């Protein structure tokens, strides 16, 4: 029976035997403790059972309704990007020793997994310019909130200052974290697409635990990290930077310009979009903060025979003995997706990453120039940007309606900034990655102009 119906491992006889074992004659008897008055006696609105062939066809039809990036050309970013994923990544992560691996508490049987995580940590340190990185976080958003919590604990201060140019969902996550820790959150506005430095200077004080900045920020603009560093370090607070790892193929590493904590999402590094997740966050710190880092750290050591080996190190953490005294509540990592990032960086190498980042930069700037030539369209910000930029549509135009028309033409349009920034209604956030060709960019701009 199980060979015919591989998704239904229980036969009628199995069910009868199980009921007999627990002392019930029917399935109905299992629910006898539930009061009759609250039992549901109708028939659930579900389709009837399908055989395997019909089920597969049905699921294919449902999947076909999704506007995926195999059939549509995507200019949508806002945190999840349509980058090229080398085929070797899927080949490697499909190996059972990786995709079935779990918590590597027993190093003697987990050397492969531990080494893979160690490699990820090493890559992140090199990219960010920081001394220590952990084994990964759930995503970039939770990594930023954890960074805020770390800063409050390390400085014994109760105020975090965060720029409105940080991803709206990340700011919401920081606010949620702050409620539990009784922290005060101050949001700083922006000028010309980047953090307003005068407002930031006025807000930061001896009560400030940290300044939280994203660069490139949510608008795609590159923040002046070197100018922000003295503002927060002048009051002995911490400088937290959320970075797009792809951009670090070109931009100066945040650690080199004074960041104390660097976080971000590794999704651009070979991780599929997967309808928004899961992704993989990274978290790196300066050495003095190492013992306050959330999550796990894999370290290199030698065994009794002097051979190189890997272990979970600094284990007095929340999932072990710290419990309620823990500096964090994260209890896992995204090891398989961290492996994706490691394979991507290993495959691309330094030159490959730099080339991919440069393609993102050049193609985005080409697209921006094309928009400038479209009647009624404007680029409201003149600050440097990486692979995303803001476009102001002609007066009265609806981003939502235009995106629906673009969808009919085979394009996934940009993010409607009016959803998170009321003052930017009628503005679209456009992302251009290395996958977009000149022909696709020209067609997108042309079709967008025709949609008004």
Image: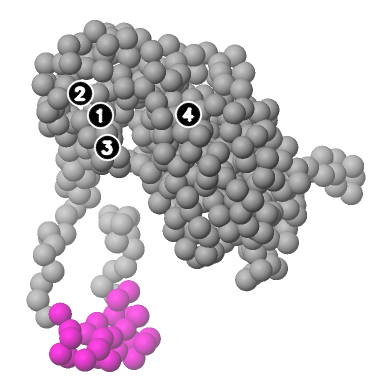
State the residue at coordinates (62%, 41%): 232
User: In this orientation, which residue lies closer to the viewer: 148 or 450?
Assistant: 148
Residue beneath disc 2: 393
State the residue at coordinates (32%, 9%): 369
Residue 428 appears in view: yes
* Secondary structure predominantly adopted by residues drawn in magenta: helix
**Mark nearer the N terminus (3 vs 4):** 4
Q: Considering the numbered disc 1 on the image, is that residue within a helix, a strand or a loop?
A: strand
User: In this orientation, which residue lies closer to the viewer: 347 or 47?
Assistant: 347
Residue beneath disc 1: 427
The reply to whether callout 1 and callout 2 are in contact (CB within 8 Å) is: yes
**Separation of residues labelled 3 and 4 (CA atoms):** 21 Å
Q: Which mark is residue 216?
A: 4
Residue beneath disc 3: 423
**Separation of residues labelled 3 and 2 (CA atoms):** 14 Å
- Left or right: 430, with 405 as reference point: right
**Separation of residues labelled 1 and 3 (CA atoms):** 9 Å
**Marks 4 and 2: which is nearer the front?**
2
């Amino acid at each position: 029976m199980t060979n015919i119906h591989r998704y239904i491992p229980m036969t009628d006889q199995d069910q009868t035997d199980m009921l007999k074992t627990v002392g019930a004659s029917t399935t109905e008897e299992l629910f006898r403790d539930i009061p009759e008055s609250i039992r549901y006696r109708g028939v659930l609105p579900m389709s009837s059972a399908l055989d395997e062939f019909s089920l597969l066809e049905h699921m294919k039809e449902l999947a076909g309704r999704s506007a995926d990036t195999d059939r549509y050309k995507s200019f949508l970013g806002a945190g999840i990007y349509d980058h090229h994923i080398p085929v070797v990544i899927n080949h490697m992560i499909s190996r059972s020793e990786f995709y079935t691996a779990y918590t590597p508490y027993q190093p003697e049987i987990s050397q492969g997994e531990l080494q893979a995580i160690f490699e990820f940590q090493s890559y992140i340190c090199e990219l960010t310019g920081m001394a220590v990185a952990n084994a990964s976080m759930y995503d970039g958003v939770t990594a930023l909130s954890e960074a805020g919590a770390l800063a409050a604990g390390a400085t014994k201060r109760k105020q975090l200052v965060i720029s409105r140019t940080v991803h709206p969902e990340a700011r919401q996550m920081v606010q949620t974290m702050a409620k539990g820790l009784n922290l005060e959150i101050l949001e700083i506005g922006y000028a010309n697409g980047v953090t307003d430095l005068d407002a930031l200077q006025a807000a930061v004080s001896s009560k400030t635990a940290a300044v939280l900045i994203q660069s490139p920020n949510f608008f795609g603009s590159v923040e002046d990290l070197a100018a922000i560093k003295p503002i927060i370090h002048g009051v002995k607070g911490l400088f937290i930077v959320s970075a797009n790892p792809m951009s670090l193929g070109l931009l100066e590493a945040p650690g080199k310009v004074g960041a104390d904590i660097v976080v971000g999402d590794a999704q651009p590094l070979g991780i599929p979009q997967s309808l928004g997740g899961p992704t993989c966050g990274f978290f790196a710190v300066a050495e003095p903060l190492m013992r306050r880092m959330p999550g796990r750290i894999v370290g290199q050591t030698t065994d009794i025979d002097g051979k190189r080996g890997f272990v979970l190190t600094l284990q007095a953490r929340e999932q072990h003995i710290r419990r309620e005294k823990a500096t964090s509540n994260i209890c896992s990592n995204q090891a398989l997706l961290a492996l994706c990032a490691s394979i991507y960086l290993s495959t691309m190498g330094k030159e490959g990453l730099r080339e991919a980042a440069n393609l993102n930069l050049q193609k985005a700037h080409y697209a921006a120039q094309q928009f400038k030539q479209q009647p009624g369209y404007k680029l409201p910000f003149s600050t440097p940007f990486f692979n995303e930029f803001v476009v102001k549509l002609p007066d009265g135009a609806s981003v939502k309606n235009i995106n629906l028309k673009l969808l009919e033409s085979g394009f996934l349009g940009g993010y409607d900034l009016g959803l998170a920034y009321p003052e930017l209604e009628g503005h679209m956030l456009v992302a251009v990655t290395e996958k977009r060709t000149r022909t696709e960019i020209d067609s997108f701009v042309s079709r967008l102009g025709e949609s008004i």
